[in-house]
Amino acid sequence: MTTLYQQLSPLGFAEWLEKNFETLMSLDEWFKDADKEEINSSERTVMNALAFRWLREEKGIDCYPVRGFYEESNFFYATVYIDNKKISDEKYDTHPLAEIACLEKAAEIIEQDNNEN
């Protein structure tokens, strides 16, 4: 089963990590371990932060969870922008779920773009 960080790896995330950071274990093992963690674990939070940075710096994709406003303040939106154009804005119950949804949507966009080229 391919999981989120393993899905991002061949899209350039692993290469970017290797170029910019030192890790104590292989990236493949780090991805597998992070994918096994609870959705709100500190390990996933670190991996998500790195993935969001990679998307901004290398892919030009801005994505982040946004809390709903007014009567929807107990929801979060998984918001994805490319070139200041909103691509996705789906509603989730928690911030961690919205983070994962953002990363999954970004991976889908990159894969689709790679397939078209």
Image: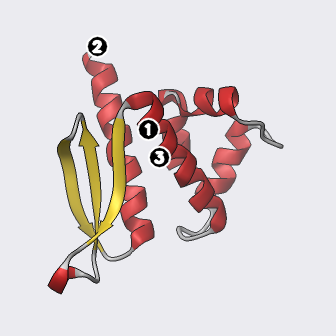
Where is mark 1, residue-wise? Answer: 55
Instruction: Tell me the kind of residue under disc 2.
Output: Asn
| Residue 3 seen by the camera | no
Return the x and y of residue 61 as percentages of the image width and height: 34, 38
Give the total of numbered labels: 3
Instruction: Please identify, in this view, whether the residue under mark 2 or under mark 3 is nearer the observer.
Output: 3
Pick whichever of labels 2 and 3 is earlier in the sequence.
3
Give the quadrant of residue 106.
Answer: top left
Q: Amino acid at mark 1?
A: Leu
Query: Would you name the residue on which mark 3 appears?
Result: 52
Please rate how many residues cluster around mark 1, counting C-alpha atoms within 10 Å: few if below 14, some from 14 to 19, many from 20.
many
Q: Position of residue 26 (x, y in %)?
A: 77, 37
Specify how the rendered protein is coloured: secondary structure
Q: Is residue 70 left or right of residue 42?
A: left
Q: At 29% from the left edge and 25% from the top edge, which residue is drawn?
A: 113
Q: For marks 2 and 1, give the one nearer the viewer.
A: 1
Residue 45 percent location from the top left of the image: 57, 61
- SS under mark 3: helix
Q: Residues within 10 Å of mark 3 (few under 14, many from 20)?
A: many
Quadrant of the rendering where the C terminus is positioned: top left
Answer above or below: position of 14 versus 79: above
| Extreme residue toward the top, this view | 117
For badge 3, the amino acid type reads: Phe
Left or right: residue 48 compared with residue 115: right
**Residue 27 appears anywhere in the view:** yes
The residue where tag 2 is placed is 117
Most extreme residue toward the right, as rendered? 24
The residue located at (54%, 33%) in the rendering is: 13
**CB under 8 Å between discs 1 and 3:** yes
* Mark earlier in primary sequence (2, 1): 1
Q: Report the residue at 65% width, 49% height from top.
A: 32
